Image (cartoon, rainbow, N blue to C red):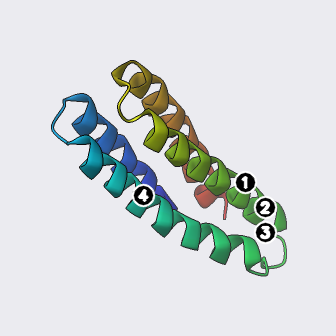
């Protein structure tokens, strides 16, 4: 779920940067993504890690929290086109980290 939210966020940033979304729609969609991610963060961080995967689960929890923080920042910056490229880069970095964690499980 988190990997797909990261991918959808990247695509959505492109959509917003092209001025194809109104500000209220963009903020609402980001809020939806953040809500979905928050549920995933809670489930992962409260779950009991399988033996031998404690480090990966802890890393995943940190990465998902960082993605949630980035989504919160994106919601605040959605009306600032000059910030979207920075946000896109940050989301891409977080997606790579999440993918690496998933691959290590």
Residue in the image at 63% along x and 67% along y: 41
- The location of residue 70, given as percent across then percent down, is 55, 42
Marks 4 and 3 sit apart, C-alpha to C-alpha, by: 31 Å
Mark 3: few/some/many CA within 10 Å (<14, 14-19, 20+)? few
Dot 3: what SS? loop
**Residue nearest the viewer, comparing 37 with 47:** 37
Which label sits in the foreground, 2 or 4? 4
Which label sits in the foreground, 1 or 4? 4
Which label sits in the foreground, 4 or 3? 4
Q: Which residue is mark 4?
A: 31
Work out whether mark 2 precedes mark 4 in sequence or the reverse, and give the earlier one.
Answer: 4
Which label sits in the foreground, 1 or 2? 1
Q: Which mark is residue 53?
A: 3
Describe residue 16's horizontal placement relative to residue 51 as left or right.
left
Q: Tell whether label 4 touches label 1 (CB within 8 Å).
A: no
Work out whether mark 4 precedes mark 3 in sequence or the reverse, and give the earlier one.
Answer: 4
Marks 3 and 2 sit apart, C-alpha to C-alpha, by: 9 Å
Q: Tell whether label 3 touches label 1 (CB within 8 Å).
A: no
Residue in the image at 65% along x and 47% along y: 66
Dot 1: what SS? helix
Residue in the image at 47% along x and 68% along y: 36
Give the answer, above or below, for where 80 lies relative to 69. above
**Residue nearest the viewer, comparing 12 with 94:** 12
Work out whether mark 1 precedes mark 3 in sequence or the reverse, and give the earlier one.
Answer: 3
Q: Which mark is residue 62?
A: 1
Q: Which residue is mark 2?
A: 58
Residue in the image at 19% along x and 42% along y: 21
Dot 4: what SS? helix
- The location of residue 69, given as percent across then percent down, is 61, 47
Give the answer, above or below, for where 82 lies relative to 27. above
């Amino acid at each position: 779920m988190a990997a797909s939210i990261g991918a959808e966020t990247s695509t959505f940033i492109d959509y917003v940067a092209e001025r194809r979304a109104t500000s209220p729609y963009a903020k609402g969609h980001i809020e939806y993504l953040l809500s979905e991610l928050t549920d995933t963060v809670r489930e992962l961080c409260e779950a009991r890690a399988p033996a031998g995967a404690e480090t990966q689960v802890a890393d995943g929890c940190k990465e998902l929290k960082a993605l949630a923080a980035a989504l919160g920042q994106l919601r605040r910056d959605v009306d600032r086109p000059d910030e979207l490229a920075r946000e896109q880069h940050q989301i891409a970095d977080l997606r790579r980290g999440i993918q690496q964690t998933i691959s290590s499980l």
